[in-house]
Image: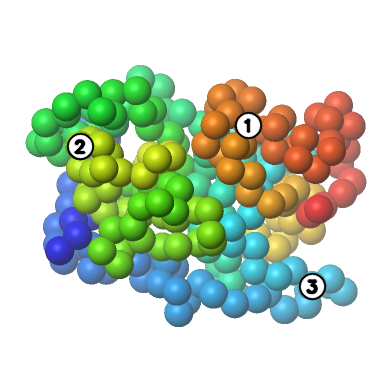
Amino acid sequence: MSRSVLPGHHIAGRVVIEFTKQRARRFGSSILLETGVIRGQIGAMDDSEISGLEGKLLIAMPSMGDPRFERSVVYLCAHSEEGAMGLIVNKPAPGLQLADLLEQLGLESDGQGRDIRVHVGGPVEHGRGFVLHSRDYSSDGSTLSVDDDFGMTATLDILEDINNGTGPRNCILALGYAGWAPGQLEGELQANGWLTCDADFKVVFECDDADKWQAALATLGISPSFLSTEGGSA
């Protein structure tokens, strides 16, 4: 059975990750990841219609007003009338890499993952682990296939596979996630908190973290200097 990378807590500045098989069974439904829950479309709101945005990028606008998301780029793994869930892809966790997590989980690192930085996936439940990855990898039915290019796996198996060299070619390991209640993300979009764009594979996996926000804007033909408080999803 797949083992969860969840849940965790902080002790003396270190992220301590624990898991149980029972928790792994409950994990999918607890964050809206079961496909029966997350698929769908959002109906008309204030004379505009917003379709399901899963598989898109959210680009934080200067008017966001939440310092936790300043210049963030978020990959949306799930979006429906039930809410939304995504991972910030450009906020590395200072001084934390895959090898550190493997050590805390009691797994021996063979050096394959030493240069894989851990990211802060969002402000919700920093002890939960997620791996956003290319679709060349799938873990025994526990991988959420978001679209043709991106998948998301949240079980310990993927960490072991990355460590032994059989994991996905491209990946981002994140602790925590960004979550929205029903209608909340739509409200933030209409308040000009975010721009949306197609998820560019190179932006997500190949750009330096410091460059991803500007690179995501560039896919829309937008320079940061031209951003204003008026606008919305593109």
Is residue 124 shown to the viewer in this render?
Answer: no
Q: Is residue 163 above or below residue 36?
A: above
Label 1, label 2: how far apart the Cα atoms are = 28 Å
Which residue was labeled with disc 3? Answer: 49
Q: Nearer the viewer, residue 224 or 168?
A: 168
Horizontal side, residue 26 vs residue 201: left or right: left
Comparing marks 3 and 2, which lies closer to the viewer? 2
| Callout 1 secondary element | helix
User: First in sequence: mark 3 or mark 2?
Assistant: 3
Comparing marks 1 and 3, which lies closer to the viewer? 1
Q: Nearer the viewer, residue 209 or 70?
A: 209
* Residue 30 falls in image quadrant: bottom left
Comparing marks 1 and 2, which lies closer to the viewer? 2
Residue at position x 33%, y 46% from top? 129
| Callout 3 secondary element | strand
Q: Nearer the viewer, residue 30 or 5?
A: 5
Is residue 47 shown to the viewer in this render?
Answer: yes
